[in-house]
């Protein structure tokens, strides 16, 4: 049942193609008969799904998502449906609260909390990156199949419902309640059946495809897909999306942050005197007698060491989440440019994806250009891992319009220069930039300062914003705890 007042509101706040998706989704969603939103990355599947639950008055909803996207769902719910009660289940020991509008949990925790989730009487369920459920015999698919049985309203989100072969659709369609043939009939009609000898007897394999036009017609009844090229006029030329994540080493980070806070409190007088600093050479404009250059140099150096330690811990805590996000993106078949700041993260990402292109600081100019040419011209080269410092200027990487920034730079100009490697002459599609930001840490503070500095052109264009960031930290005297 569509709530027309809520539908009118969604039309006012969403882009036209997103509003059409909500209208279609709310009209198509029915008890036991789910829908699949398969838009390309960057087109707002999350926003559409939330508005569909709102317009269709679905009720209490469970969101199942990769761990790297849990906090992003909390952020998006607060943005699109303010006032909603949200619980993000962070560990296998968290209580599942009954007084929420949305419960957000990652795939790995669903099977551990299955008994509790079954008791919650959810009316709706959203599977983000639903291709995670393509394996028929996997534990996560088995649990999800059982979990949805009492849940009437089901929404799947994925840019890649089929990664390798149509047989991967079977468990997803079963979970959505949209499998129009039984497993055997579906596979024999659409999955290129072939009999092979397994060493003992002839068996059926379903590794191919067949009758794709008929498959497409059936999917159109409950699935929608839009590509960037088709809706490009409705999109900004470049858009940033902040992806908040929780560090895996948060306890270690907190201890280091407490050390920094203790140091800041011990040096409170000097920090107050330093609040007027503006740039590397400009330790001036003090209301009191300014400290000597030597004192300021030692203060700046010691503070930088504290902040550098915090940045290293953030990098270490985000590495696994970055790997998960990239692995989830690559099945889209689109190219992706990944920027990282520390050598440790750059090398870890490069080594994790064998055969990817890369530009690291120690590379010669010739090797860098060889890597650029391979990424630009080789269709099989889908990923480039690049140093924010080494690759942020002068290079053209318009083979992709997708950018992931794993670690935030100190300077807003460095971030913009990195983004603009793809946002150049020759780029025909809107550029999507995702920023992986560690929630509750120094990075949130850095992001706020970067945003503010970028809005003030006469301070952002000089490229010396490292000290400006340090100055802001000196002013607050603390890191992420403001």
Image: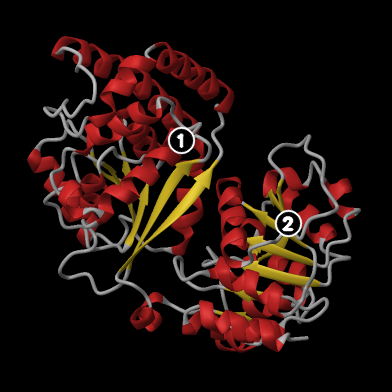
The answer to whether residue 406 of the structure is visible from this angle is: no
Foreground residue among 286 and 389:
286
- Are there few (<14), some (14-19), or many (20+) residues within 10 Å of tag 2? some
The answer to whether residue 459 of the structure is visible from this angle is: yes
The structure residue drawn at horizontal position 30% and vertical position 55%, both measured from the top left corner, is 381
Foreground residue among 418 and 285:
285
Q: Quadrant of residue 2?
A: bottom right
Of marks 2 and 1, which one's residue comes earlier in the chain? 2
Residue position marked by numbered label 1 in the rendering: 319
Q: Residue furthest left?
A: 366
Q: Secondary structure at mark 2?
A: loop
The structure residue drawn at horizontal position 55% and vertical position 73%, both measured from the top left corner, is 38
Q: Secondary structure at mark 1?
A: helix
Image position of 370 with respect to 175: above or below: above
For the N terminus, the quadrant is: bottom right
Foreground residue among 411 and 335:
411
Residue 122's x, y, as percent?
83, 62
Residue 39's x, y, as percent?
51, 73
Left or right, 356 with reference to 99: left
Q: Which mark is residue 306?
A: none
Residue position marked by numbered label 2 in the rendering: 85
Q: Residue furthest right?
A: 119
């Amino acid at each position: 049942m569509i709530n027309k007042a809520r539908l009118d509101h969604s039309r006012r706040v969403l882009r036209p193609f997103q509003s059409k998706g909500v209208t279609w989704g709310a009209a198509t969603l029915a008890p036991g008969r789910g829908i699949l939103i398969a838009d390309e990355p960057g087109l707002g599947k999350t926003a559409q799904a939330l508005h569909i639950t709102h317009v269709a008055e679905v009720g209490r909803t469970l969101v199942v998502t990769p761990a790297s996207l849990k906090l992003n769902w909390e952020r998006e719910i607060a943005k699109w449906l303010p006032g909603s009660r949200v619980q993000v289940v962070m560990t296998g020991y968290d209580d599942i609260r009954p007084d929420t509008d949305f419960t957000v949990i990652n795939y790995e925790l669903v099977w551990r909390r299955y008994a509790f989730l079954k008791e919650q009487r959810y009316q709706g369920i959203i599977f983000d990156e639903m291709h995670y459920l393509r394996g028929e015999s996997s534990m996560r698919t088995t649990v999800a199949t059982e979990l949805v049985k009492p849940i009437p309203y089901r929404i799947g989100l994925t840019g890649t419902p089929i990664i390798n072969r149509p047989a991967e659709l079977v468990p997803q369609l079963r979970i959505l309640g949209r499998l129009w043939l039984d497993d055997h009939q579906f596979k024999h009609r659409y999955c290129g059946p072939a009999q092979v000898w397994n060493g003992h007897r002839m068996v059926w394999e379903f590794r191919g495809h067949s009758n794709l036009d008929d498959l497409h017609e059936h999917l159109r009844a409950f699935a929608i897909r839009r590509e960037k090229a088709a809706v490009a006029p409705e999109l900004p030329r470049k858009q940033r999306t902040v992806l908040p994540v929780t560090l895996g080493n948060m306890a270690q980070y907190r201890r280091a942050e407490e050390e920094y806070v203790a140091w800041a409190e011990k040096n409170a007088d000097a920090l107050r005197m330093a609040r007027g600093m503006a740039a590397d050479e400009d330790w001036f404009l003090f209301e009191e007698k300014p400290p000597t250059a030597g004192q300021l140099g030692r203060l700046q150096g010691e503070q930088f060491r504290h902040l550098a330690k915090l940045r290293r811990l953030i990098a270490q805590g985000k590495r696994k989440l970055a790997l998960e996000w990239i692995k989830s993106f690559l099945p889209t078949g689109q190219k992706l440019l990944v920027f990282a700041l520390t050598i440790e993260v750059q090398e870890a990402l490069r080594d994790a994806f064998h055969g990817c292109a890369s530009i690291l600081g120690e590379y010669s100019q010739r090797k860098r250009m060889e890597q650029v040419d391979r990424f630009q011209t080789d269709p099989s080269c889908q990923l480039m891992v690049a140093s924010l410092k080494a690759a942020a200027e002068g290079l053209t990487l318009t083979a992709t319009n997708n950018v992931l920034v794993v670690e935030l730079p100190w300077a807003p100009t460095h971030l913009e220069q990195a983004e603009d490697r793809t946002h150049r002459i020759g780029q025909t599609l809107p550029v999507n930039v995702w920023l992986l930001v560690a929630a509750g840490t120094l990075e949130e503070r850095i992001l706020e300062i970067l945003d503010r500095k970028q809005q003030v052109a006469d301070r952002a264009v000089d490229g010396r914003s490292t000290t400006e960031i340090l100055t802001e930290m000196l002013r607050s005297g603390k890191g992420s705890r403001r």
